[in-house]
Image (cartoon, grey):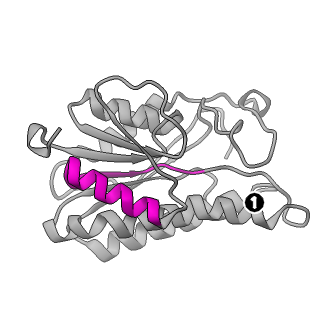
Amino acid sequence: MRKDTYSKLALVTGGSSGIGKAIAQKLSDEGIKVVIADKADSEKLAGGIEFRKCNVTSGREIDELYSWTTENFGHPDYLILNAGQGIQEKLSEGDPEKWKQVLDVNIMGALRCIRAFTPHMISQKKGNVVFISSVSANQPHAYGGIYAASKTALEVIAETLRQETLPHINVTVVSPGIVDTNFFKNQVSGNSTVGEMGMGAIAPEEIAEDVWYALNKKKGTSINKIITRPTLQQF
């Protein structure tokens, strides 16, 4: 399918499941052509959403993703940086190699995508970049130091991108609280569950609605940060 058959194109990293899948489905339902990039095989997605296997820790695979996307569908109007991974380890006891893995996904993965996809947005003087962060950003907590640090860095990167691309690119940070996904199950290490936390959880579709809201502000207005969490969540 060529770009001239649709009006907008979105690229969603980590779009095979959870929040990323919900965002991809919401955008598709709203008439946006969607490409999801994920290292995991895609769960079934309706609406003709395109899938490209890609590990954001690989510069080569990001370059291949860029070439494949632009050659087949055009340049994305919306870049949704959702790929991420959790970890729960004590700083004095954990495994630095696992920490490096998480930082490479959560920070360098986003940076690689920014470097590949935003230059065209800048040249066209338009575009939206959405960072999926976490309420853990700027919130030091036991066993959560590496994850919180990665999301804190991500939000600094987002604000830097906003300043460097003014007034052409709209940059939004969406910081979810506890979401009912397999996030905890898929952590590098750690054994927390949504149920054990006892504060409830929101559906990933609620985060997708936040993203859609941010993307649809009138020209000249930007939503730069959204925090959404269960009412019972304490942090």
Residue name at image x 17 percent, y 49 percent: 218
Image coordinates of residue 214 in percent, x first then y, are 31, 46
Q: How many marks?
A: 1
Indicate the position of residue 231 as horizontal and vertical percent values: 59, 32
Q: What element carries label 1?
A: helix
Q: Is residue 150 left or right of residue 33?
A: right
Q: Which residue is drawn at 16% across and 71% down?
A: 123
* 12 sits to left or right of 104: left
Would you say residue 187 is visible in this rendering? yes
Q: Give the range drawn in magenta.
A: 60-84
In which quadrant of the rendered view does residue 112 lie? bottom left
Q: In this view, does 172 lie to the left or right of 232?
A: left
Q: Which residue is drawn at 48% across and 36% down?
A: 16
Whether residue 138 can be seen here: no
In the image, residue 132 above or below residue 178: below
- Quarter assignment of residue 70: bottom left
Across and down, in percent, residue 30 comes to 24, 30
Q: What residue type is labelled 1?
A: Lys
In this figure, which residue is indicated by the disc labeled 1?
98
Examine the image and state in which quarter residue 67 appears.
bottom left
